[in-house]
Amino acid sequence: MRDLGAGSEDRAPGEELMDGASTVLGLPDDRRRTALSELGRPLVLELFAAMARLRAFDERAVILQRQGVIGTYPTYFGEEAIQAGSVLGLEGRDWLFPTYRQNSVVVLRGCPPEVPLLLWRGHPAGWHDVYKLHTAPVCVPVATNYPHAVGAAWGSRLLGEDRVALAYGGDGSTSEGDFHEACNLAAVVAAPAIFLVTNNQWAISTPLRLQTRVERIADKASAYGMPGARVDGFDVFACYLAVREAAARARRGDGPTLVEAVGYRLGPHGTADEPSLYRDPESARRWEPWEPLARAGAALVDAGLASPEELHRLSADAAVEMRQAGDRLQDFPLPSLEEVASRVYRQTPWTLGEERLREPTYLEGG
Ligand SMILES: Cc1ncc(C[n+]2csc(CCOP(=O)(O)OP(=O)(O)O)c2C)c(N)n1
């Protein structure tokens, strides 16, 4: 297992998070500046702008949920570095297999932001072009996207295509059978796959220490005969480099990699969750100084690669873009229950039939 520098479990952040010698932002100032300069100003600004767009999407989605425009929504505040770094660390032809938590990465592939917002509105228009954008629909069943990604990766190789498939997941997902089966098969057939596990240390209310006995999720890789890498999930440059390296490995025919991006779930599990019921609100506050957007911005200014005004402009533009996308949702009236049910099954089962849906107990959730 290669340690790219990250923190662990629910301990205090800080020195521990930064002690990895190969973490770009963990490097002493002079080496960090060199590393960022090597990536180049256009790329580091692109990474920042991608994070700013993801952040603005997430903030807008929470507002829209509060306004009743969309339904329940899984916020990803603090996980933007992992998402932006991974999308840009791959090529556009590579496959993404997101979960609910990466529900807007498809926007970084060119999808209009109202499309994933409409998904949370329960509207049939919340459906992007999977084949054009090489991004699978978000998976809500935990871990089921891992075998999908392995199938896509292996299939691409059999077809002679040069495509890597990356599946996202959380720390909790690594306890699922699908994770085990996918990792095992990917390694056996040397599928060009990347398992990118966001270790945000919580699976709804289950903390990492009750999830697994291993100290580092990346250690699980050795059981499948693949390399595991650990990366600071609050560091977009480190995430980008880790995914780019895993993708290069996959393209060489050397098989899959398990990348563990360590961070902390700064917000609730979703808009219907109240984390103070099961964890000390102080713990999230201790991690907040590491949130990736401010941290990347400070690094870019420090390295002389961007001005604060320039970065502010990127964030402001992203906020306008997402507000306008949210405004456009009004053009999509909420679908009726019948309409929603009619698109789930080829033949609507009697339990969801029109008459049943009209029963007051059903509508009241009874
Ligand atoms: C197969 C399955 N079991 C249970 C659930 C309910 N559930 C939704 S999210 C979640 C926690 C997942 O935690 P983790 O994998 O750490 O990802 P995170 O939510 O932190 O991104 C659970 C148990 C589900 N969606 N699918």
Image: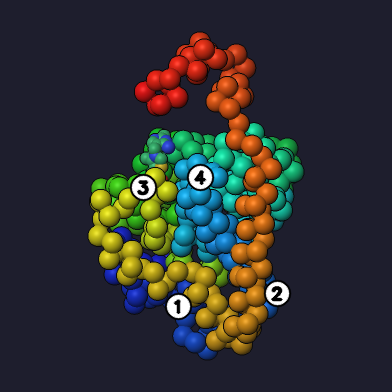
Q: Amino acid under label 4?
A: Gly
* Foreground pick, 2 / 353: 353
How far is disc 2 from disc 3 in space, using C-alphas? 38 Å
Residue 150 sits in quarter: top right
How far is disc 2 from disc 1 in space, using C-alphas? 22 Å
Residue 86 at x, y percent in the picture: 58, 58
Q: Please report whichever mark, 1 or 3, sits nearer to the chain's N-terminal start.
A: 1
Dots 3, 4 in contact, CB < 8 A: no
Image quarter hosting the C terminus: top left
How far is disc 4 from disc 1 in space, using C-alphas? 42 Å
Disc 1 secondary structure class: helix
- Horizontal relation, residue 201 to residue 243: left or right: left
* Foreground pick, 116 / 98: 116
Q: Which residue is mark 4?
A: 68
Closer to the observer: label 3 or label 4? 4
Image quarter hosting the N terminus: bottom left
Residue 292 at x, y percent in the picture: 49, 69
Give the residue displayed 27% in from the left and 55% down from the top: 276
Q: Which residue is mark 1?
A: 26
Q: Please report whichever mark, 2 or 4, sits nearer to the chain's N-terminal start.
A: 2
Q: Which residue is mark 2?
A: 42
Residue 166 at x, y percent in the picture: 58, 49
Q: How many numbered dots are placed on residues in this image? A: 4
Q: Which residue is mark 3?
A: 273
Count residues near mark 2 (Cα–Cα under 10 Å), then give few for <14, some for 14-19, many for 20+. few
